Image (spheres, helix red, strand yellow):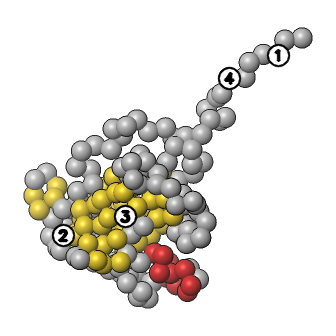
Amino acid sequence: MKRAALVPTGEATLGPFFPPRYVDEGANDLTSCAGRKAKGEAIEIRGRVAQQDGMPLHNLVLEIWQADAAGIFRHPADPRHAQADPDFLGWGRAATDADGNYLFRTIRPGAPEGRAAHINVMVMYSGLMRILKTTLFFGDSADPVLTAVPASRRELLVAKKKMGIYEFNIRLSGENETPFFDD
């Protein structure tokens, strides 16, 4: 008896599958909105995304979401959202290059009420079965999310400032794996 060929379905394939230009030009620059400069200190965040063996991941998509310089999220869930900087969208997207490097230009966020200044990061890659979520912090300060991470791993969530640029590397698994969070 001849066996029928198996055809992959949406449930059987890994995804998402990103076309090479999934990220729009300029989506990694949050320093202005509709040509108007956002309030606050403009910063650059650079990093490299690698898998367990240290090999870079090409065309991985990172999304960030953050508060403005006053610590206000431009989102209805933030009770102060009406006072958010109208020239700061608070959301951006970047893709990694062939060496696994990414870059965001943004505004250093203020600290939202009850939290330290931080940037939320989502990692999406062809073959990942779920979106990975982590948080970038600017220092080891009191924050309920950061203190929930074992003390020995907290430094993996703190961006290192080198020559005026914040560096935040992400390791998907293995030694020095970036701590990721569930919803």
Instruction: Specify the quadrant of the image occupied by residue 70.
Output: bottom left
The answer to whether 109 appears left or right of 9 in the picture is left
- What numbered label is drawn on residue 47? 3
Amino acid type of the residue that numbered disc 1 sits on in the rendered structure: Arg
Q: CA distance from mark 4 to mark 1?
A: 12 Å
| Quarter in which the C terminus is drawn | bottom right
Q: Residues within 10 Å of mark 4 (few under 14, many from 20)?
A: few
Q: Position of residue 181 (x, y in %)?
A: 55, 67
Point out the tag, 3 or 2, that comes first from the N-terminus. Answer: 2
Point out the tag, 3 or 1, that comes first from the N-terminus. Answer: 1
Amino acid type of the residue that numbered disc 4 sits on in the rendered structure: Val
Q: Is 90 in front, or is 127?
A: 127
Q: Residues within 10 Å of mark 3 (few under 14, many from 20)?
A: some
Residue 155 higher or lower than 167, as above or below: below
The answer to whether 104 appears left or right of 59 in the picture is left
Amino acid type of the residue that numbered disc 3 sits on in the rendered structure: Gly
The residue that appears at 42% across and 86% down in the rendered structure is 140
Residue 35 higher or lower than 69, as above or below: above
Instruction: Specify the quadrant of the image occupied by residue 112.
Output: bottom left
